Image (tube, rainbow, N blue to C red):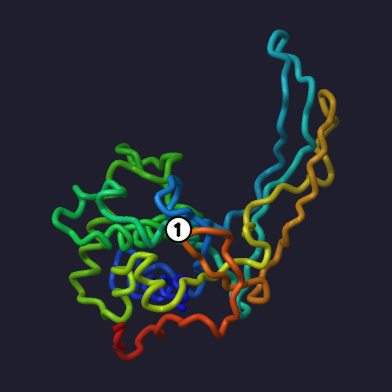
Amino acid sequence: MIDYTAHLWTLMVDIVRRVPALGFIDMREVLVFARYGRRRAGGALATCHALDLPPSGPDRCTWTDRRSGRIVRQSEWFVARSPEVRIGGRRIRHLMSVALPRFCDQTLDRAGKQDLYPDGAPWLARLDTVVHELYHIDPGADGIRRAVRTDGSRSRHAHGAAFYQDVAAMVRAYLATRPDPAIVDFLACDHRELTRRFGGVVGTTFRTYPSFPQRYLEAADPQPGPPAGHQVRIRPHRQPTLYTEGDLRRRRFTARGRPQPVDASGARAAPSPGAAPSSWS
């Protein structure tokens, strides 16, 4: 079987080496993992998750009476924190999630990207999505890149008017470097073709599947002040605050049904960056 997330990581390594605008990314600090996404269903194809966000300041949730505006309930003060992920002793700063098998089946027409790649091959939609997620990484180590307004200030939104054009320009710049087919060609296969060629598609997941490392809330200690109404306690988080390679699992992603764990030996890993070209036939 083919390890799809390993191939995506190797592709990303090659992209950041060849595209100057993304050259600041250290792929040793990026982990690619898979989530389940049904074929032809809506929803995200891939997502960039930042793990290097600092703890938030104390905050709280309040509930007010619609008529009087008086606070009737208030949560404990809480702090939002990011879990830590360390692979081989190195801290991971960004996670890239990919929805399988849906990611494998996207095409330019379904993704609405025909105008960006006139007469382009359908699989360019997949390459565009990979570059899109890499472009979300902020060069200032501030988590997720924010769009810049016309006055030069940063927007709250991650996608600006020029974002998609920038991504398409980077895709074209990457292809102009004539990347090794052994690294890129897997994108040309949809999920059905990958299954036919390799016997199945697997991807890295976390032991806590379908959960994965995400920001969590922790009650502030000490509490800044007494509640103004009935206090609602913050539920204790149950997911790990530290993940390591021991928390990674490979699962097989099929066109239907829950992804199933597989033995690591049952997946074909991606070619190592810089390896000699190999045949996919």
Percent of width and height locating residue 1:
46, 78
Q: What amino acid does circle 1 point to? A: Gly
| Of residues 182 and 92, the one drawn nearer to the viewer in this rendering | 182
Snapshot quadrant of residue 137: bottom left
Q: Is 61 placed left or right of 251 in the picture?
A: right
**Residue at the top extreme, as displayed:** 67
Q: Is 191 placed left or right of 170 in the picture?
A: right
**Residue at the left extreme, as displayed:** 119
Q: Residue at x 47, y 58 (%)?
A: 99
| Of residues 200 and 110, the one drawn nearer to the viewer in this rendering | 200
Percent of width and height locating residue 43:
45, 46
**Residue at the bottom extreme, as displayed:** 276
Q: Residue at x 39, y 68 (%)?
A: 24
Please tell me whether residue 281 is drawn above or below residue 203 in the rendered image: below
| Of residues 8 and 218, the one drawn nearer to the viewer in this rendering | 8
Q: Which residue is mark 1?
A: 140
Percent of width and height locating residue 7:
41, 75
Pointer 1: residues within 10 angstroms few (<14), some, or many (20+)? few
Q: Residue at x 43, y 41 (%)?
A: 157
